[in-house]
Image: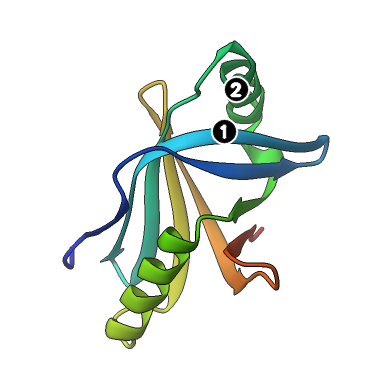
Amino acid sequence: MAVSIDLRVGITPFEFWHEFGEDQINVINSKVFVESKKLVLSCDAKPVDSNQRSDAKLIFRNPHLLTQIVVTDERVFERFTRYVKNHRGEFDSFEFAITFENQKYQYPVKVSKREIGGMVLQVQA
């Protein structure tokens, strides 16, 4: 595994899009690293209240329904972009990994910049 870079240690909201709509859930320990030719954005779900916890349970009860993850935090986006530029040639795909209630979920994703800031992680089939 290449050097891991913390994108944001504290809490930041991520938007989780699925076939029923969108839910915002806070995450912590956002980091990026290269592993087995994959660039991985990893984090831990940290629901702030019972509503977010309920949303997270619904999402991860049916993890195959997740279609995209939206990251609006500019600091996370800037640090992620810098890491990508510094490690070109070390990876050939992207992955989003999130841990919720001691269970790790991994998604192959396509990453794109949002016009209004941040980035979209489009889940690939």
Seen in the picture, residue 85 relative to 15 is either above or below; the reply is below
Left or right: 70 in relation to 103: right
Who's the residue at 62% across and 54% down the image?
A: 70
The quadrant the N terminus occupies is bottom left
Who's the residue at 62% across and 23% down the image?
A: 61
Image quadrant assignment for residue 4: bottom left
Who's the residue at 51% across and 55% down the image?
A: 73
Mark 1 Cα-neighbour bin, 10 Å: few <14, some 14–19, many ≥20: many
Left or right: 52 in relation to 90: right
Seen in the picture, residue 46 relative to 106 is either above or below; the reply is above
Who's the residue at 40% across and 37% down the image?
A: 11
Element carrying mark 2: helix
Image quadrant assignment for residue 17: top right
Looking at the image, the residue that sits furthest to the top is 50
Tell me which label, 2 or 1, sits earlier in the chain.
1
Which numbered disc covers residue 33? none
Q: How far is the residue under mark 2 from the one under mark 1?
A: 6 Å
Element carrying mark 1: strand
Seen in the picture, residue 89 relative to 107 is either above or below; the reply is below
Left or right: 31 in relation to 52: left
Q: Position of residue 16 (x, y in %)?
A: 64, 42
Mark 2 Cα-neighbour bin, 10 Å: few <14, some 14–19, many ≥20: some
Query: Where does label 1 land, which residue?
Result: 25
Left or right: 23 in relation to 97: right
Query: Where does label 2 land, which residue?
Result: 52
Marks 2 and 1 in Cβ contact (< 8 Å):
yes
Q: Amino acid at mark 2?
A: Gln
